[in-house]
Image (spheres, grey):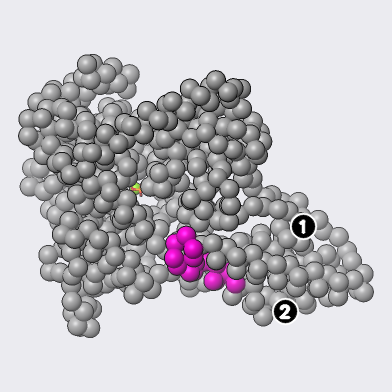
Amino acid sequence: MKKLTGIPVSKGIVIGKAFLFLDTDFAEIPRFRIEKKQTAEEWARFLAAVNEARENIGSLQHVQKSVTGEEDGILNTHLLMLEDTDFHEQIKRRLETGLQNIECVVWDVAAEFSRKLAASPVSYLRERAADIADITGRLLNILLNIKKPSLADLTEDVIIVTRDLLPSEAVTMNKRRVKALVMGAGSQTSHTAILAKAFEIPAVFGLPGITSEVTSGDTLIVDGGTGEVLIKPAAKTIEKYQVLIVKAHEKKDKQEALRDLPAETADGYRVALNANIEFPEEMEQVLRYGAEGIGLYRTEFLFLNAGYAEEDEQFRAYSHVIKAMGNKPVTIRTIDVGGDKILPNLRSVEEKNPLLGLRGIRFSLAHPDLFKVQLRAILRASVFGVVKIMFPMISGFTELETALSILEEAKRECRDKGAAFSERIEVGSMIEIPAAVVIADILAEKSEFFSIGTNDLIQYSLAVDRNNEQVGYLSQPFHPVVLRLIKKTIDEAHAAGIKVAMCGELAGNPKATAVLLGLGLDEFSMSAPQIPPVKQIIRRTNIEKCRVLARNLLMCKTVRDAEAALKEGDG
Ligand code: PEP
Ligand code: MG
């Protein structure tokens, strides 16, 4: 048996079989000359590969539809591209004039297509470059007889062991069959981590050598709460963990019994506990865990399926969520792409520093037409309930003013078209860049609420890439810098008479609950399964104790001191 400890990302203990999911490396494509008479044979191989790819996509679509109930837009696009006559003609021409094997012809033609698309001034065309890469990989896997398994058509229960998994891959995997996720890369706040939590899949990340330690079929124990991964455990160890699994279920049942009780301290201090969602399909879970509202709807994940979501499609998704919540508020965040949220079809230009690039509101302001489509869809859906809108990655007052003026334009357009919308929509700013904290008093003039995104706030204030496991240890929520930034945001907001929510992962971290209460946070928003444990802590504490704890923590000079003060506060 071997025990490794990585970053605990999504809670839960699982005993199961490993499934190694490895990347394909096309760097070394065989490249050789062929005789003129061989071209017909190579062309036939290409057509057969296209056929097989088409069949693979067809069966993927079938699985995808049976899981989500919807057609997958990306897969539809890929089917169209596979059939593209221009693509076929160019391959044939190059094969006949260049006299090289079909693998390298496919590679070269695809590279040319991608280059042209990437240079296009039309963003929709630029975004298609990622699809070309996807279908090229699919065709080359077939031609070179490389079996890259697809996570969408898993038929057995598995624990996925992989170097890295893109959020897009996590979305399309067959979630019913994925019992746990163990990854070399990643951190607690990477988007794949956020998805693992949303899907309630136990996960441990940050184990760089994991793919060489484990073989497919190995028995693994994964403890997403402690970050432990046990490889080929002894029968006795398995028995011990089986007991722990039963206990964990009992604890969960107890916490879930609090569902309909308020998030109120023992001395009557009330806060709101909301849920973060990525997909409308999460609503059943959100209601099951007793969320009082949606504090963060990460709408960019809607674009993952189709690359571009039409206004009506967005309207349907938002309406579904708003209707499901009844009269409880739904905070819709406008699209936030970039960083690790590389959505295959919504990728804009290549950036050397994507985390400092065209992310969040910057993307929307650079594409006002796309932005207005989203705003109109939200506005139209607002008639079904209580809607709030918030803008991600605000770094200055002008950005906020521009976003607000585009919202006004979208409202005018709705009125012109006779489309009804609620006149009472609160609009807020996400506070996730240190610059926004520094000018919180100014932003508060035009914001009806703040929502602190600690995932990015920690990343940008401590200069720690939230996806880089090498520096993950520096991503410290109890760092004095982070605590002071949170305090300043809350104080400035309260001075201006507006409320502050937090929707970063820290809001759902039970270790942070008391101190956040003590700092005066009004609303907590987290992945729905985190609500019961956080509520339990709130109901057991009292506000004065929390305020003392917060004051103590703010005086600490180091993370170590702060964590010691937290432990003492627990006692
Ligand atoms: C955050 O940055 O804390 C946040 C909630 O936004 P996201 O994780 O989607 O970047
Ligand atoms: Mg963020």
- The disc at residue 391 is none
Residue drawn at x 42%, y 26% is: 244
x and y, in percent, of residue 568 in the image? 23, 16
Q: Main secondary structure of the magenta part?
A: helix
Q: Which numbered disc flags the more N-terminal residue, 2 or 1? A: 2
x and y, in percent, of residue 288 in the image? 28, 49
Q: Which residue is mark 1?
A: 144
x and y, in percent, of residue 265 in the image? 12, 32
Residue drawn at x 8%, y 47% is: 496
Magenta stretch? 65-79
Q: Which residue is mark 2?
A: 89
Residue 75 on the magenta segment = yes
Amino acid found under the numbered disc labelled 2: Glu
Per the image, label 1 sits on a secondary structure element best described as: loop
Disc count in the image? 2
Amino acid found under the numbered disc labelled 1: Leu
Does residue 160 appear to the left or right of 279 in the view shown?
right
In the displayed structure, would residue 185 be above or below residue 417?
Answer: above
Report if residue 467 is visible in the image: yes
Residue drawn at x 83%, y 70% is: 42
Does mark 1 have its CB less than 8 Å from ligand 1? no
- Asked if disc 2 and disc 1 are in contact, CB closer than 8 Å, the reply is no
Residue drawn at x 19%, y 40% is: 489
Does residue 32 appear to the left or right of 183 in the view shown?
right
Mark 2 vs mark 1, CA separation in Å:
22 Å
Q: Which image quarter: residue 316?
A: bottom left
In the rendered image, the quadrant that contains the C terminus is top left
Q: Which image quarter: residue 501?
A: top left
Per the image, label 2 sits on a secondary structure element best described as: helix
